[in-house]
Amino acid sequence: MKGIVVQKYGGTSVKDTRRIMNAACRVVSYRKKGYDMVVVVSALGDTTDELIELSRQITEEPVEREMDMLLSTGEQISIALLAMAIHKLGYDAISFTGTQVGIVTDTSHTKARIIGMSSDRIKRALKKGKIVIVAGFQGQNQEQDITTLGRGGSDMTAVALAKVLRAKVCEIYTDVDGVYTADPRVVSGARKLDKISYDEMLELASLGAQVMQARSIEVAKKFNIPIHVRSSLSGKEGTWITKEERKMEEVLVSGVTANKGEAKVTICAVPDKPGLASKIFTTIAKADINVDMIIQNVSRTGRTDLSFTVPTSDLAKVRRVAEAISKKVGAKGVMYDKDIAKVSVVGVGMRSHTGVAAKMFGALAEKKVNIGMISTSEIKISCVVKKSHAAKAVQAIHKKFQLGKKK
Ligand code: ADP
Ligand code: ASP
Ligand code: MG
């Protein structure tokens, strides 16, 4: 055998039985070339969203343990169907849940982190000549409860398996040809990148480009695992996510993205006293809520408005916590704004070039898009705009930086 290849098929690549057969054919074609195959699959199409919607019809704030019990069922369907499809092609395959292959996570339900993984069972199956199929997105905590790894978590399963199995490559199959300068569904002139650095992909993914899960890129970077993002519907070469190279720094901006999954929370008229911000954000962190952008308005009256953004999916939890804090610190109540989107530009070239922010604000101003909040880091700039302006903003920025042109 030539070594192990890990492939991951996203929901779009297994959305119906025809696509499942298509994925099976590709897996078998690699097998015929002499590779040991370990295949991670996501739930069929929009199954995960549909399961979430079902739970929402019952309660706004489901117990997270039960949420994981529910969501993990999606992937269990696809592994069995893919195994059957491979059998149909005359090859031996066996499917496993996360628990069965010993993926151990922490106890943080719905966004658990992998803390260990055994490869014995997979290796034994491979030795017997089987194609191994593993359910993405799921694991088990030390109390033997099923956990899930956060949205898009099958990417994490694939990267983690590639690491423990020392795979030759980790291929991520999706419905686009690779990573683009912007979401090709939003910007028609978006260009496929041949290569992108881990850091840029990490930022793009964290800032809304759902083509890869951000946390999986952190792990890939840490262990230097090369990732090839490509289409399950064509044989074309996709995008390689790799270590940063000198040449990458020459490009000012690599991509632009929008995230519509956040809401703005404002705690109004907080007394302007030392220690209050610390008190507020410690309480929020203790509730396991990820706060993103934070702004505090200038205080002229001894009171100040404190705004921050959180994932919309955490909003029910945030409401409970924020309202309690507001009372405790003597603020005048909490306001919520779900009508926001965060638009960002990303590029390692920003480390050595200036003027990116001005150019980005210029593009937004020309389109009369108002900016609500701004945040920057070494390789990204983000602006909060109205949700309905997100597509227009991304298109304008893409054009301004001429990202559609080959560099
Ligand atoms: P999968 O089911 O394979 O996990 P996803 O729907 O999660 O697929 O991710 C693929 C989608 O990500 C694409 O259809 C594309 O619209 C979207 N996307 C957003 N930003 C980008 C980008 N910069 N490059 C490529 N795809 C992107
Ligand atoms: N099915 C899960 C989700 O939709 C995991 C994944 O597709 O990667 O988030
Ligand atoms: Mg995905």
Image (tube, grey):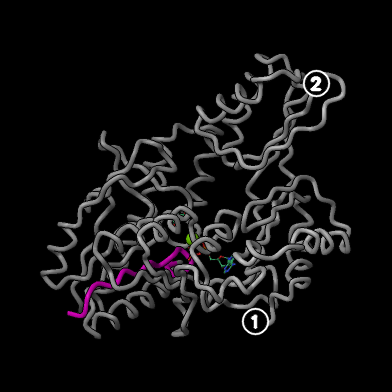
Q: Quadrant of the N terminus?
A: bottom left
Q: Which residue is mark 2?
A: 303
320 or 168: nearer the viewer: 168
Q: Can residue 142 be seen?
A: yes
Question: In the rendered image, which quarter is residue 136 located in?
Answer: bottom left
Please report the bounds of the magenta region as a residue range: 1-14
Residue 197 spot, x, y in % from top left: 51, 67
Q: Can residue 77 be seen?
A: no
User: Is the residue at mark 1 in contact range of ligand 1, meaning its CB lies under 8 Å from it?
Assistant: no
Mark nearer the N terminus (2 vs 1):
2
Residue 342 spot, x, y in % from top left: 69, 52
Q: Quadrant of the C terminus?
A: bottom right
Q: Is residue 334 above or below residue 399?
A: above
Residue 180 spot, x, y in % from top left: 59, 72
Label 2's element?
Answer: strand
Q: Residue at 56% across / 54% down in the picture?
A: 206
Horizontal side of 342 relative to 213 (left or right) equals: right
31 or 12: nearer the viewer: 31
Mark 2 vs mark 1, CA separation in Å:
50 Å
Amino acid type indicated by mark 2: Arg
Q: Which residue is mark 1?
A: 407
Q: Residue at 31% across / 76% down in the picture?
A: 27
Residue 394 tag number: none
Horizontal side of 75 relative to 128 (left or right) equals: right
